[in-house]
Image: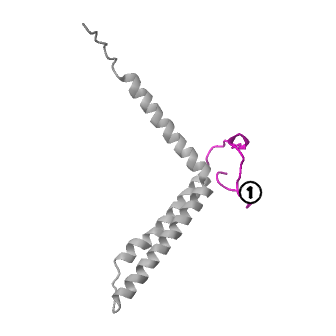
Amino acid sequence: MYGIKTDNRPDIFESSEETEIDENNATLKDLNMLFSDIIELSNKADILSHGVSMSFGEKPLYTLNKTIITHLDIINELKNDIKKMEKKNRLIISKLRSEESKEKELEKRVKEETKPKRRKTELL
């Protein structure tokens, strides 16, 4: 399964030659885990947009200060959660990105092949 570690030790490799990645096809379970992580991050980020529309009550500066500090805390949590999500799903994410780069490269090659050849002009 993509991105699931068998133990809690960090992955440390001396060189890329020591790294062996077993190429397996992505399963529905892998995609489901990726989508659930994305939804969880989206729900946490949604707190930021709803916090902006709140009223500040009797102590506006105190409430504004607390709101800004809370938003900054949530942003830091989101950064950490995004790093965890990328680490947990790194193999499927890299596979998706490599597929995207292959498609772009193929489109570029097709575009280069279909370009008309330019004629060389001779100087007199």
Q: Amino acid at mark 1?
A: Thr
Taking the spot 52% from the left edge, 40% from the top edge, the residue there is: 99
Most extreme residue toward the left is: 124
Residue at the location (55% across, 65% down)?
81
What residue did someone put label 1 on?
Answer: 6
From the top left corner, tell me how far across and down residue 91 is, in percent: 61, 49
The secondary structure type at the circle numbered 1 is loop
The relative height of residue 91 versus residue 82 in the rendered view (above or below) is above
Give the magenta range.
1-27
- 99 vs 49: above or below: above
Query: From the image, which quarter does the C terminus lie in?
Result: top left
Q: Residue furthest bottom?
A: 58
| Horizontal side of residue 91 vs 102, given as left or right | right
Total count of labels: 1
Q: Is residue 104 left or right of residue 56?
A: right
Magenta-span inclusion, residue 3: yes
| Residue 6 drawn at (x, y percent) | 74, 57
Q: Position of residue 112 (x, y in %)?
A: 40, 25
Classify residue 20 by image quadrant: top right
Tell me: residue 80, above or below residue 70.
Answer: above
Percent x, y of residue 27: 62, 49
Overall secondary structure of the magenta section: loop
